[in-house]
Image (cartoon, rainbow, N blue to C red):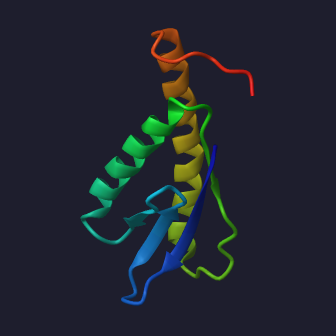
Amino acid sequence: MIIEAKLWVDDSGEDILSFSLDPEIHVRLTDVQGVNDLKDLFVEILSNLILGDVSVELQDSSEYENQMYKEICEEYIIELNKDIAEARKNLILEGLIEEVDE
């Protein structure tokens, strides 16, 4: 499963990193609530790991203007994918899920 991530600014000027899950998760980058949004995201990702491999891809955000947040989010997605791979490996090693050839 590939989860698409996109950077954008909502109508109130809030910087958002959204993830194409069901329901879609919006991480507010400039709000204290963003920490809880990230926890919700990781819970959803772990739930999907049971079904198979998961990775996150940051979509082209050329219209997004905040270069600092863009660079931070690019690095976050790289680290998140490493964490996802490690979590899946641990779930397999613990016998909680089976390795599936995809």
Residue 19 against residue 55 in the figure, above or below: below
* Quarter placement of the C terminus: top right
Percent position of residue 45, x then y: 47, 42
Toward the viewer: 61 or 44?
A: 44
| Residue 17 vertical position relative to residue 81 in the rendered view, above or below | below
Name which quarter of the figure residue 1 lies in.
top right
Q: How many marks?
A: 0
Q: Residue furthest bottom?
A: 11
Residue 48 higher or lower than 37, as above or below: above
Hey, which quadrant is residue 33 in on the image?
bottom left
Q: Position of residue 27 (x, y in %)?
A: 40, 63
Please name the residue shown 48% across and 66% down the image. Answer: 17
The answer to whether residue 21 is above or below residue 17 is: above
Q: Nearer the viewer, residue 56 or 79?
A: 56
What residue is at 49 percent from the left and 27 percent from the top? 87
**Residue 83 visible in image:** no
Could you say where residue 15 lies in the image, as x and y percent from the top left? 43, 76
Q: Position of residue 90 (x, y in %)?
A: 49, 18
Residue at the far left in the pictured view:
32
Residue 59 visible to an observer of this rendering? yes
**Going by the image, does 98 lie left or right of 100?**
left
